[in-house]
Image (tube, helix red, strand yellow):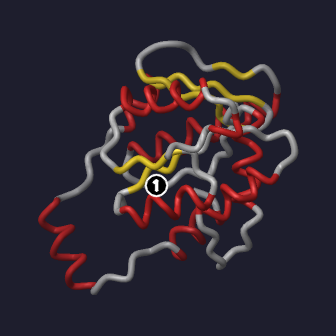
Amino acid sequence: MDALDTRLKTFFAPATPPRLARRVLGRLGPPSDLSALAPRFAIEASDRGVRRLAYGRGRDAAATRAGRRHLERAREELTEYLAGRRTFFSVPLDLEIPPFQARVLAAADRVPFGEVSSYAELARRIRAQRGAEPILVAVTGYGQADDQRRSREAGFDAHLTKPVTPDHLAEVLARLARRPPARRAAP
């Protein structure tokens, strides 16, 4: 682990009473060392970070020097994690994100640290972008009539209450995709 790892571990250390932690950890026993499983993972990395981690099949892949550095760091962190010496990963990820999803994440990223912005506000920002015709579906644990009204007012096309099955979500998305953008919002 490097200095950043140590600093993050200190910063995110849980504030629990010392005796309680000792009692719980004492009952659990030492963590199992699973580091022998690390070679069974195939890691694919690019210049921007780790793209894929697969267990049991495939080979490590990195086409550039930067990619190989990310791959090596990911392998090291994975081994430390499986050995019980690490609780988080700091190697960057290269997620292949479609352009629209990238804009949504960028809008969420513009929310200043320490401030709160609701999904409704993000929906308004996304709808305001020129040329954007997204299908926005609120998936929430709140299903009262007032919650559904607020979702519609915020610009969501549909409001689903958890739990939502993948089949139901696919059905709603297919129905909304058939409607013209101006008429998507579900009544």
* 77 lies left or right of 33: right
Secondary element under disc 1, as helix, strand or loop, is loop
Query: Amino acid type of disc 1?
Result: Arg
Q: Mark 1 points at which residue?
A: 86
The N terminus - image quarter: bottom right
- Vertical position of residue 168 compared to residue 84: above or below: above
Task: Pinpoint residue 127: horizontal percent, then vertical percent.
Answer: 74, 50
Q: Residue at x 41, y 17 (%)?
A: 56
Q: In which quarter of the image is residue 98?
A: top right
Task: Pinpoint residue 179: horizontal percent, then vertical percent.
Answer: 62, 29
Query: Most extreme residue toward the top, as rendered?
Result: 58
Q: Residue at x 72, y 22 (%)?
A: 62
Q: In which quarter of the image is residue 77?
A: top right
Q: Residue at x 68, y 45 (%)?
A: 92
Query: Most extreme residue toward the right, as rendered?
Result: 130
- Vertical position of residue 111 compared to residue 105: above or below: below
Return the residue nearer the eye: 177 or 59: 177
